[in-house]
Amino acid sequence: RISLFWFGNIPQIILMDPELVKEVLSNKFGHFSKPPQPAQVKVLARGLANMEGEEWAVQRRRINPVFHLEKLK
């Protein structure tokens, strides 16, 4: 199921299908971006969740091997 609502002048989409969520989050075209954050958050929290674009892709490739099942055991 897909729901659309407006938060002020910004459209928000709610996805309930896990496969559709996975497809949207793995999309590399940039049609869906993260909501803007205050400057204080950008200064204090510099993790993968706050990165976007090429910087996010590079960091994600670096940490991806850490989460393989064989390494977690």
Image: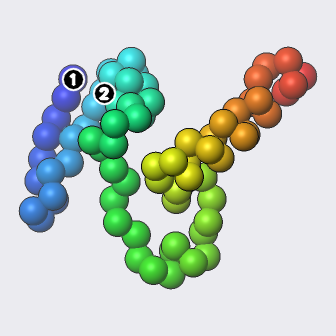
Q: Are marks 1 and 2 in contact (CB under 8 Å)?
A: yes
Pick whichever, 60 or 73, lies toward us: 60
Residue 18 locus on image (x, y percent): 40, 22
Q: Residue at x 56, y 52 (%)?
A: 55
Q: Residue 16 got which mark?
A: 2
Name the quarter where the N terminus is drawn: top left
Pick whichever, 1 or 36, lies toward us: 36
Residue density around tag 2, few if under 14, some if 14–19, many if 20 or more, within 10 Å: few
Quarter of the image for residue 25 reads top left
Q: Residue 1 got which mark?
A: 1
Q: Residue at x 33, y 50 (%)?
A: 33
Nearer-N-terminus badge (1/2):
1
The three-letter code of the residue at mark 1 reads: Arg
The three-letter code of the residue at mark 2 reads: Met
Image side of residue 52 versus residue 13, left or right: right
Residue 54 locus on image (x, y percent): 51, 48
Image side of residue 26 versus residue 60, left or right: left
Pick whichever, 21 or 50, lies toward us: 50
Residue 43 higher or lower than 73, as above or below: below
Image side of residue 59 versus residue 21, left or right: right
User: What SS does tag 2 mark?
Assistant: loop
